[in-house]
């Protein structure tokens, strides 16, 4: 089952578009390599809200309008009212890694994982998944990952999903939402590395798991039992992540990248942000409490 994502939000091509989130009536996303945080309320109101001189791997919003960033320099807080970016914690044991994808869990913790900075080391098990709590404490939850990527939880918060990109796997874990403990690691889905690798991930209102497969040009929708339910052709080989938004959370947004595009086979659509109305619905994005990061 497929449909074309023909509408681009604008003609702006991102080097590595990632992390779309529908937050308080606006679409937010990042350009990791450019160190930029973007937002759009409509096609005529698209802006770069923040530009840093280093990579932004992921971010989360607080209920009072701040952002917690997971960057090359660790966890940081961005306050749009002042424009200030302040450090919270940098748990990375070496400077060989940077933060990558992350998301807020149903209990209001910010989870984000790392990956190698050097592309030649992407397949090495350098990735670590961390959980940042409201006090600013970053706890290591899982090590030995390659590129720690797309993360989300089932509707009842009993299962956590995580993409281990270079191994071509979506992992599933039993999840204790009270304590944040993860157990019973297992493989939920596998991907053919000759075709594409799992990148961003999101769970919809019906507990279906969606993954953007970079290199294949597809978004896949899996049933909770792991069977494939839908294949969506994006229109470029390089989809990176996805989110549902709009007034009823039925508009699918897909970020893409030109970061890995073959220069001998240029792709005019690579790097654009796409949108399409669907018959499916997503969920509201979890937000961090207003106290988050205040005492870090």
Image: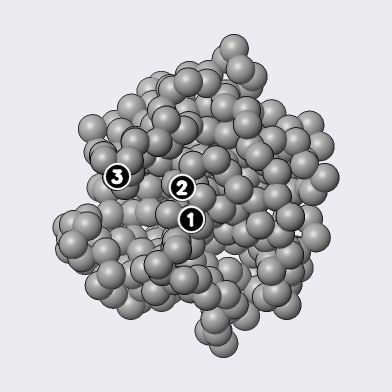
Please state if 247 lies on the left or on the right of 112 as rendered.
Answer: right
- Residue found at x 40% / y 36%: 267
Secondary structure beneath label 1: loop
Query: How packed is label 1: few (under 14 Cα within 10 Å), some, or many (20 or more)?
Result: many
Residue 256 visible here: yes
Q: Which residue is mark 3?
A: 262
Could you tell whether 124 is left or right of 223 in the image? left
SS class, disc 2: loop
Local SS, label 3: loop
Q: Are marks 2 and 1 in contact (CB under 8 Å)?
A: yes
Image quadrant in which you'd find residue 30: top left
Residue drawn at point x = 27 percent, y = 48 percent? 72
Q: Position of residue 84 (x, y in %)?
A: 35, 27
Mark 2 surroundings within 10 Å by alpha-carbon count, few (fewer than 14), some (14 through 19), many (20 or more): many
Q: CA distance from mark 2 to mark 3?
A: 10 Å
Disc 2 to disc 1, how far (Cα)?
Answer: 5 Å
Occupied quadrant, residue 26: top right
Lower position in the chain sequence, tag 2 or tag 1:
1
The image shows residue 175, relative to residue 114, as above or below, that is below
Q: Which residue occupies the foreground of this view, 90 or 294?
A: 90
| Residue 176, horizontal then vertical, whole percent | 63, 76
Mark 1 or mark 3, earlier in chain: 1
Q: Residue at x 66, y 57 (%)?
A: 231
Report the residue at 59% width, 12% height from top.
44
Give the position of the N terminus as an image quadrant: bottom right
Q: Which numbered tag is attached to residue 216? A: 1
Along the polypeptide, which appears first: circle 2 or circle 3?
A: 2
Within 10 angstroms of label 3, few (less than 14), some, or many (20 or more) residues? few
Identify the disc placed on residue 237.
2
């Amino acid at each position: 089952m497929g449909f074309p994502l023909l509408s681009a939000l604008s003609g702006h091509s991102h080097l590595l578009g990632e992390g779309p989130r529908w937050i308080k009536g606006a679409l937010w996303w990042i350009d990791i390599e450019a160190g930029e945080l973007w937002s759009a309320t409509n096609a005529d109101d698209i802006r770069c809200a923040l530009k840093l001189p280093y990579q932004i791997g992921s971010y989360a919003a607080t209920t009072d309008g701040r952002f917690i960033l997971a960057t090359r320099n660790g966890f940081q807080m961005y306050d749009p009212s002042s424009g200030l970016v302040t450090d919270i914690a940098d748990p990375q044991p070496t400077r060989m890694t940077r933060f990558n994808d992350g998301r807020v869990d149903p209990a209001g913790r910010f989870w984000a994982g790392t990956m190698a900075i050097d592309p030649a080391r992407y397949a090495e098990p350098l990735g670590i998944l961390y959980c940042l709590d409201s006090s600013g404490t970053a706890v290591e939850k899982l090590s030995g990952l390659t590129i720690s990527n797309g993360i989300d939880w089932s509707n009842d918060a009993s299962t956590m999903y995580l993409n281990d990109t270079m191994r071509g796997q979506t992992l599933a874990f039993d999840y204790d939402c009270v304590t944040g403990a993860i157990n019973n690691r297992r493989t939920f889905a596998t991907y053919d590395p000759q075709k594409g690798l799992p990148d961003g991930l999101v769970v919809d209102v019906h507990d279906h798991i969606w993954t953007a497969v970079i290199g294949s040009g597809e978004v896949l929708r899996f049933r909770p039992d792991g069977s494939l339910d839908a294949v969506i052709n994006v229109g470029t080989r390089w989809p990176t992540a996805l989110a549902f938004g709009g007034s009823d959370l039925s508009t699918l947004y897909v970020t893409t990248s030109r970061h890995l595009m073959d220069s001998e086979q240029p792709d005019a659509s690579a790097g654009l942000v796409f949108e399409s109305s669907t018959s499916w619905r997503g969920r509201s994005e979890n937000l961090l409490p207003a106290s988050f990061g205040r005492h870090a």
